[in-house]
Image (cartoon, rainbow, N blue to C red):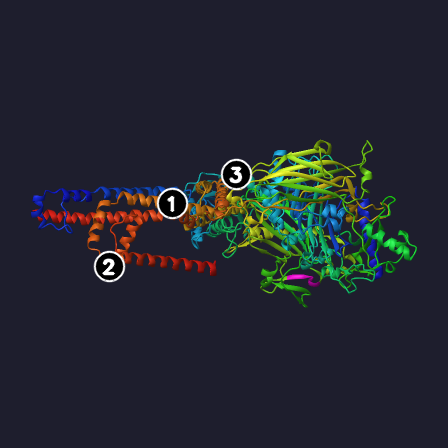
Amino acid sequence: MFRLRSILVFLVLFKSFGSIIGEEEEKIEEFSEALLLRPLPDRKVLAHFHFESKVPPTATHGSHHHLFPKSIYQLVHKYRVQEMELSFTQGRWNYGRWGGYDPISSRNAKPPGVELWATFDVPQHQVDACWRNLTHALSGLFCASINFLESSTAYSAPKWSFKSFAANIRYGTLHREAVCTENLTPWLKLLPCRDKAGLSALMDRPSIYRGFYHSQRLHLVSNEFDLTAASSGMVLEQTLTVVLQPVTLGSGMVSSLGLIQQPSWSLSSLFGREVSGRCVLSNASNIYVQLEPNLVSELMTTSETQQQSDVENLMSQAWSDMSFEMSDSPVRLIEEVYGFQKESSLLYEFSLANYSDSRPFNLEFRWKRPVTWSSQLAPLQASRFLMGSGNERGAIAISLKSVGRSGYAESSVNQEGRCSLRVDVFQVVPWYVKVYYHTLKVFLDERLHNLADVIERINVSPSEDKVSPGLMEIALRLPCDVQLVILTLEFDKGFLHIDEYPPDANQGFDIPSALVRFPEIKTKIHLFEDKCVCKSPILSKLQEESPVLWYTEVLLVPLTTPDFSMPYNVITITCTVFALYFGSLLNALRRRIEEEERLLKSKDTNASGLIGMLLSKLSAKLRGKALEPPSLPLSSKVSYRLILRVILVAGIAAAWQYFFG
Amino acid sequence: MVEISVTATSSDPPNTKSEEEADFYPDTMRKTKPGLKRLFLTLTVFISFLIALPFLLKSIEIYRAPLPFDDIDLLSTEMEKNHLMFPCQFQAVFVNFDDDITAVNELALLINSHMQKLTSENTPPCGTCGNNFTVAVTIDSNSSCIHCESGNGNGNGKWQCGVLNGYDKMNDHDENFDDYLESVLDSKSKRVYTVVVVNTKQEDVRVVVGKYRHAWMVGIDSVEKAVEKMAEIFIKVFVNAGKEEGSIRGEFMPIGADGKVVLSFSLLNSDPHDWIYDWDFKELDEILLAPIVDALRPVADISLESQVLYHTPKSSYSYWDDTRGSYIFSTKDLPFFVNSNEWHVDASTAAGGRSKVLHFVLYVPSAKECPLKLQLPNGEISMTNGFISPMWGGIIVWNPPACVENFQVQRLSRQKISSEDLKMISEVFMGQLRQLFGLKSESLYVGGFATSVLLTSEKGFAEWELDVLSRHHTCFNLLQCGTTLGSLSRLVQSLPRMIIMDEIGKQVKYSLEAAKLSFGNVSLGYSDASAVSSRKARALAEDAFYHPSMMSVSYYSFEHCFAVYSPFFLPVSLHVLLAVIREWKRYKVENRKYLAWRVKLE
């Protein structure tokens, strides 16, 4: 049995090896799965699922597939999609605690709701039509309201924030989209094993939606229509990033030193399930545990005091005598090689090939002593807020705060020898927030700065009422030693037509997240190329350079919301006034004044009954004419009664007001 | 008037007053005529309100495009009552018969009456010829050639006498003779169905229906028998495509309204842990399916797509049968076989609009239910191990060779289904496709006294079968168009406050026009043109029915209307009405007073 398994492992290794070697001769469809787990400094655990499907181009491979999802292939061909990224996110990535300077955060931290951008290989005038059709197809495919991105007020065409100088890119977000299991199921359907086997079987819906952050992403690259370049077909990358709070195993939260014990976790405690073997269709099926550079250095400095150890030692030595232990021994230990810096991350690799139904894989990660560390942060911490009050005007401010580290700067020294940092800001504003772009001000360390000195490039496309949103892309060139940068923009709040208000208008209106990008600061995991022969797609993805990104918060702008019953009120009041006028006019026309007076006179002569007399007297009084001098006691009696009555009514009203008001 | 009466009473000379005072009671009489000014005024207001009311109603009216309800009803009742009958032309050829056996006219009448008998047995289904056919008879003897036509045949594809003289290959090879007959008759362009009876000295009776539009009979010496058989072939085979009652009717044609059909082939590995099978669909596509797609092009535009799915167990049960050595699932399990939760044989995005998707599923059972076999109701095991679900598609259970051999060796590696197996599978799929289109998949037709051989085309569909399909397609489209428009008109009439856009009205109009055109083409015998216009009629009818504006219930509801107009019109109309009533009453009272005074005066 053992021999068989080792043969199998060898076979798997050989197969993937062969696929790399024989890339030129024969391309086949490939699928791979991987899960990366990383303990986070704030007692949480990041789980990052990564699935990749590759298909060779249609020209050589044909249009019939064995692994690649048919629906995606048809989508690409029907709408001629070159590249597309769709993400469904719940919660907000905590850049301060979970890190903002690693490939996973820069790729998988997404704004809440749905974000979609796509580039098309069609002439310029067809791009919008393609985008509209694509949004409808995707909304059907993923059971989400992506079709709301169809309207031209919902999407924009950024010039250089996503793909440099791509003319046929469209970008849109839906921040209110609720993400739930009905979006995950169709996403899983694109995987050959769905959630029946392999790593995706871990996705127990209650556990993954209980997390603090949940981002499900689909990234598609296709150069099917690119005839000049050597086409590599289509690559579909599906990732699910969740941040979970492990259920603490055992007690002893606070150690003697006052340090907080990190919670130990296992796959079953995180997900409530275990992995029972790999998906048989995947080429590689690995689980990685990543220790962040700061954590590794922290562990090393603390262990140095106890015993002489270095990275080599860390590798050769059993992890059991370190500050943590793992229940299974990893297949490999991959160490990041990053210049001469001490800080480098560690990756423990576990292969699922050896596990099966009868022997499920349940990795357990147990801390032995309390450790504190912090994640690597982006060079500037971005946040965005609103200024001003009232329902008329306000201002958006984007603040970039230095984290006080200059380690990022060495790559960005320009010719004059001055250290500078380039920051791109991308902001889409809905049309009803009318931004005055000329009011853009930049404050460096709380001093107003000349725009021309700071801004390298700017692209603004102002919003058009009910047609298109406003878009602003700025490339800032900042000195490295700057501590605080604030950009402000003033805006007027627009008025919407009564039909355009969403159902819950009083909640306010969202301004989508701004994207702050550091294009010169690239992040990747540095691995020895020759050391890992059987590269897994997740590792090669992590080795790709990607710029550091930061999505800011979604802003909530309260707009003036009308009283929605107002039209009816106005109609009712106006109509009543008109009706009164009309009625009195009609009455005036058909009134016979003399006859009435005559009647009154004849009634006066034979007036009978107390009430009639009172009434006539009252009317006489109201007219201000002393018709006839009445007897005095009767008059005083009447007025007395009248006053009593008025007082009674007023008392009742006051009581009503007091008790029920 | 009041003032006048007042002045009259005050300015009366005192001398007359005394004598008149005696019999003048101001409560019951008056001396002047009651005035009409105020009554006239209020009535004017009231009447102008009445006149303005239609204008108001007109201004708050909801726009509803006029729909031709009568025409729609006419169409749907016409489709329900009398089925669409296509004109057909038949030709009977008697070769080597004595020309004096009977008069040719009588023969024609005889065939006609036989055919009438066959068609009148039951009401003809839609898409057949009914009684709308012509029969031409030719007797081709060695010496003479007599031709006769009944009805208004135009002599199309007339039989050339003597072409079979010296042709003795008809027993050698049916295919060759079929091709030879086609070259003689050229039915492709003329659309005449021909049956040739050859009188040879031969013992066994042999009836063959060719791939084109003709059939031949050998070994029948009696004319009566030949005539009977001939009528049967005309009606039962050429017109009805050998369909019996109870089979899939022509009303269900799996062709989309745009004339497109997507054949979606899925290979389902129910448990990839046991084995993974793969197919070379390219081969299946190019070699086996491409001819069918080509053959069906006149009827439908077919596109193909394929996918391989994994982890797709079936949802019905099967039990182990020791005697057969296999797992058995019976026909009553079939409704539960398709596992819609796990089989994601989705509608494809390529099939946009209203194309019809037909799913063909090749199910590879897992090791714990292998070999899996289908038991027919009569207890036998199905030969094809597959079944169809009308309008959905077909399913074949394919038992991999590994399930009887030792499969441990081949585990986890991807294996290809061998091309022999693939060929067999594709043949079953083809049979299923024929069944889904309502054709028989056997190559024999058991008729009255002799079994006819139906030659199979390598393209899967014979010419006469395509004719049947095209007729059924036209019929199905018109039927659908009629029902869709009928339900549209019912819906529109039942919701009086629904906005109907002009576009819908236009679509309905064009749809009706196209349907009318299709009817016209049918009666003229242009089957292709009628298929095109019927398709258009159905597509337009569905466009109208599924128009987005139809979905939204009118925003301008009656409640809204009432809320907007009642604050003004309710009080004002009360005022006006009361004023009119009061004035009228008063006028009547005053008039009576005046009359009373007049009477008194006289």
* Left or right: residue B333 compared with residue A591: right
Label pair 2/3, CB-CB below 8 angstroms: no
Whether callout 2 and callout 3 share a subunit is answered no
Q: Nearer the viewer, residue B409 or B68?
A: B68
Which quarter of the figure is the N terminus of chain A placed in?
bottom right
Residue at 22%, 53% in the rendered image: A604
Q: Is residue B372 magenta?
A: yes
Q: Which residue is mark 1?
A: A577
The amino acid sitting under disc 1 is: Val
Are the numbered discs 1 and 3 placed on the same chain, yes or no? no
Q: Is residue A616 visible?
A: yes
**Above or below, B486 relative to A161:** below
Q: Residue at x 43, y 55 (%)?
A: B121
To which residue does mark 3 refer? B189
- Return the residue at label 2: A609
Q: What amino acid type should be assigned to the residue bearing mark 2?
A: Gly
Residue A450 in the image: state x and y as whole percent: 71, 32
For disc 2, the neighbor class at 10 Å (few under 14, some 14 to 19, many from 20) is few
Residues drawn in magenta: B368-373
Left or right of residue B8: residue B299: right
